Image: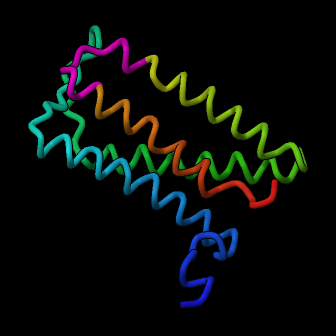
Amino acid sequence: MSSAAAHPVSTATPLRRRALGVLAAVAACVAIWLVGALGGVDYAVRSPGQPEVVVNLVPVVVVSLGSALLGWAALAMLERFAGRRATTIWISLAAVVTLLSFVPLFQVDATGGAKITLGLMHLAVPAALAALLPKRGH
């Protein structure tokens, strides 16, 4: 078995590795949602003054994909304009955005299971992106 076959992600082109990061982020969110759904999680979420919304799989895919692509775009812009500091800045920015993404989660009325699984999704996207988007050696 060649080294490339043993570690396909590490030898992939940057574009392929980053696309894989986006795919991994979405797949992780879908998997978390499915595990929750199979475990009986009620994904009904109630925001003050708003009608109840059931978080089904379509918004999970759309939001995780959109977030992952925005993360990729932000990193690409930072690499263009911030040079060697791009990855450090991007990781810091991703951490801040991740923390801020929890604010609405604490403000809605939902079951504990829904809050836990949705919170795990909020962590899955930046984890996948941080693992696969930054250039290696930076």
Q: In this picture, is 61 found above or below 115?
A: below
The residue lying furthest to the front in this view is 1
Q: Is residue 106 magenta?
A: yes
The residue lying furthest to the top in this view is 48
Please tell me which residue is depicted at 72% across the width and 40% down the height of the picture.
Answer: 90
Please tell me which residue is depicted at 41% across the width and 19% down the height of the picture.
Answer: 104
Total tally of numbered discs in the picture: 0
Q: Using the rendered view, name the quadrant where residue 5 is placed.
A: bottom right
Q: Main secondary structure of the magenta part?
A: helix
Query: Residue 95, image x and y in percent?
Result: 62, 31
Q: Nearest the camera: 1 or 16?
A: 1
The residue lying furthest to the bottom in this view is 1
Tell me: 3 left or right of 87: left
The colour scheme of the drawn protein is rainbow
Q: Is residue 124 magenta?
A: no
Query: Residue 30, image x and y in percent?
Result: 31, 51
Q: Nearest the camera: 109 or 85?
A: 85
Please tell me which residue is depicted at 75% across the width and 59% down the height of the picture.
Answer: 135
Q: Using the rendered view, name the quadrant where residue 102 is placed.
A: top left
Query: Residue 58, image x and y in percent?
Result: 28, 49
Range of magenta residues: 104-115
Q: Using the rendered view, name the quadrant where residue 126 is placed.
A: top right
Query: Residue 21, image x and y in percent?
Result: 54, 59
